[in-house]
């Protein structure tokens, strides 16, 4: 696996986790849980953004690894 | 009036009267009340029974007696709310049986509790060794309440310095194949949500014996047809594992890359994910 595809894999996993956490933040019934999920979501979104940015850089620098 | 009609009317009237009287007398279970209340209940029961069976010819006499035995306890209950002394006279005083791990034989004798009785009371609380007990009180209802020694108590999350997810009581939303709309509304959930949940589990409403929504908002289903295996998704555990995996991968990238800027970026992100993991651990795993 190339670095790019590895990054893509991690990114996909993180995005899936983000969606699930968003769901839990929505359906958690205790205020404390809700807040914890929402705060976690904010941090996670930053990480996802950074990773997506890095992936773009790599693809720009080395277009031969660009895949779907 | 034939005798049986008289008996019928008598019993019906008394039934309603006693029903109301017992409701007024309180919510306490007769077994858990003090001996005083037990006597009150017994006398009311006996007078009613005698009256119903026509053993007391004078109706007014019996009703007067009944009124005294219902109203006086009510009055005393009300007064004992305000007076500690009266409460102790009515209900007795609890006796300390074990103090600082030592049996108080004097109090045991005063409470007329034998050693056997004490052991039986302890066993009823799953305590088989007196050495495990720090403090025990014989309540006025005859029950033993006890405090175990600090090192013999069941471990609580607090003892392990664990943070745990706060729990809200589970709500039943489906019972016997019927949707309980009140409960759904209380949870702020809609019918559509429930239908979508059922659809994703692949079961029809008629087949559901019990459906409960837990504190995390997850739906638990019990089916009439026990042969159907419901997927028991440990979504929260899997979510935690996914996050952990991503965090490990970010650390790996940070070690692998040569580029200084992105090295730092990956390391920072990995640390951030670690924070998220710590924050969510009580909510996802416990």
Image: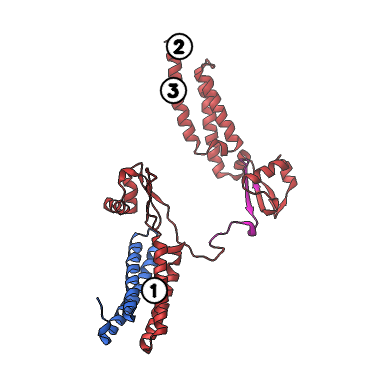
Chain colours: A blue, B red
Q: Going by the picture, which residue comes out furthest to the top? A: B2
Determine which of the numbered discs, if any, sits on residue B185 in the image. Answer: none
Determine which of the numbered discs, if any, sits on residue B3 in the image. Answer: 2
> Residue B75 at x, y = what percent?
53, 36
Q: For mark 3, what is the residue?
A: B13
> Residue B273 at x, y = what percent?
40, 74
Q: Which chain is disc 3 placed on? A: B
Q: Are marks 2 and 3 on the same chain?
A: yes
> Residue B83 at x, y = what percent?
58, 44
Nearest to the eye among marks 2 and 3: give it: 2
For the residues bearing labels 2 and 3, Cβ distance under 8 angstroms: no
> Residue B36 at x, y = what percent?
60, 35
| Res. A10 in view | yes
Q: Which chain is disc 2 placed on? A: B
Give the Cα distance between marks 2 and 3. Answer: 15 Å
Q: Which chain is disc 1 placed on? A: B
Question: Is residue A32 positioned above or below B53 on the image?
Answer: below
- Looking at the rendering, the stretch of residues picked out in magenta corresponds to B137-157
Circle nearer the N terminus (1, 3) = 3
Q: Is residue A43 left or right of residue B72?
A: left
Nearest to the eye among marks 1 and 3: give it: 1
| Res. B272 in view | no
Q: Are marks 1 and 3 on the same chain?
A: yes
Q: Is residue B154 left or right of residue B16?
A: right
């Amino acid at each position: 696996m190339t670095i790019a595809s590895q990054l893509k894999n991690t990114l996909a996993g993180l995005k899936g986790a983000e969606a699930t956490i968003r769901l839990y933040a929505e359906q958690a019934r205790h205020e404390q849980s809700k807040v914890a999920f929402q705060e976690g979501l904010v941090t996670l979104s930053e990480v996802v953004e950074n990773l997506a940015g890095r992936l773009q850089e790599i693809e720009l620098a080395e277009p031969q690894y660009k895949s779907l | 009036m034939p005798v049986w009609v008289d008996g019928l009317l008598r019993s019906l009237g008394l039934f309603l009267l006693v029903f109301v009287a017992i409701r007024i007398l309180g919510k306490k279970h007769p077994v858990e009340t003090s001996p005083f209340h037990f006597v009150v209940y017994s006398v009311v029961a006996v007078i009613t029974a005698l009256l119903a069976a026509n053993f007391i010819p004078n109706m007014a006499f019996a009703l007067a007696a009944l009124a005294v035995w219902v109203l006086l306890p009510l009055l005393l209950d009300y007064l004992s709310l305000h007076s500690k002394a009266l409460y102790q006279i009515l209900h007795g005083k609890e006796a300390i049986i074990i103090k600082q791990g030592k049996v108080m034989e004097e109090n045991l004798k005063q409470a007329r509790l034998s050693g056997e009785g004490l052991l039986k009371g302890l066993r009823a609380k799953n305590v088989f060794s007196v050495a495990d007990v720090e403090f025990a009180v014989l309540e006025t209802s005859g029950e033993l309440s006890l405090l175990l020694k600090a090192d013999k108590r069941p471990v609580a999350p607090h003892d392990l310095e664990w943070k745990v997810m706060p729990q809200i009581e589970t709500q039943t939303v489906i019972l016997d194949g019927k949707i309980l709309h009140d409960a759904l509304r209380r949870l702020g959930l809609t019918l559509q949500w429930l239908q979508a949940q059922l659809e994703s589990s692949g079961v029809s409403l008629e087949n559901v014996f019990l459906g409960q929504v837990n504190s995390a908002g997850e739906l638990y289903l019990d089916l009439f047809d026990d042969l159907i295996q419901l997927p028991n998704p440990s979504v929260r555990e899997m979510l935690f594992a996914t996050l952990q995996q991503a965090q490990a991968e970010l650390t790996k990238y940070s070690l692998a890359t040569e580029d200084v800027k992105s090295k730092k970026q990956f390391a920072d992100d990995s640390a951030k994910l670690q924070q998220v993991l710590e924050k969510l651990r009580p909510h996802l795993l416990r």
